[in-house]
Amino acid sequence: MADLAKLVILEESVILNLAGNPNFVQEFPFLSGMLNNIPTGGTAGSGCSRCNRTAARRINAINGVKQSFLSMGAEKKQRLKQLLNTEKIRLRLVAGGKVMEYTF
């Protein structure tokens, strides 16, 4: 068996990879359909370049998934660690204009 990683940081790219893996989607249903619901950059002339609404929607969607991971029970968090082959998981969540860091 491979050695455990000490820490996995659940950032956007990791979350998007998890959402694309059917095993993780089955285990964590809130990932279902996430890839279809996360807005991408769009094409020229779409969205608002000044305030970048698309980016704001993307950040809100990712933060929602991060919040779902945080609100899971201890057993589900342990299962996530097992599936990711790690001892600890860290994520950063923007809440109220502040960046909060959580490790479990």
Image: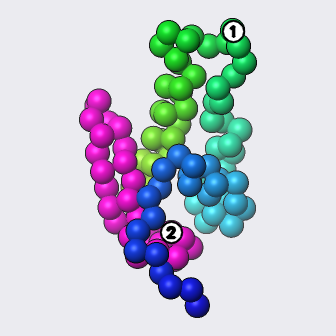
Q: Is residue 22 left or right of residue 64?
A: right
Residue 25 position in % (x across, y down):
65, 59
Say whether residue 88 is left or right of residue 25.
Answer: left
Residue 41 on image: x %, y %: 64, 26
Label ID, residue 45: 1
Q: What amino acid does circle 2 point to?
A: Leu
Question: For the point 30% across and 40% down, which residue is it?
Answer: 99
Q: Position of residue 21 (x, y in %)?
A: 70, 60
The structure residue drawn at horizontal position 62% and vertical position 57%, both measured from the top left corner, is 18
Observer able to see residue 66: yes
Along the viewing direction, whichever of 42 and 61 lies nearer the viewer:
42
In this picture, is 78 found above or below 60? below
Front-most of 100 and 22? Answer: 100
Residue count near mark 2 (Cα–Cα under 10 Å), binned few <14, some 14–19, many ≥20: some
Q: Quadrant of residue 58?
A: top right
Rendering coords of residue 71 (x, y %)? 39, 55
**Left or right for 73, reference 23:** left
User: Which corner quadrant holds the N terminus?
Assistant: bottom right
Numbered disc 2: secondary structure: helix
Q: Which residues are magenta?
A: 77-104
Check if mark 1's residue and mark 2's residue have beta carbons within 8 Å. no
Residue 80's disc is 2
Q: Secondary structure at mark 1?
A: loop
Q: Is residue 95 magenta?
A: yes
Count the numbered circles shown: 2
Indicate whether 11 appears above or below 89. Answer: above
Residue 102 appears left or right of 48:
left
Any magenta on residue 60?
no
Q: Residue at x 57, y 11 (%)?
A: 48
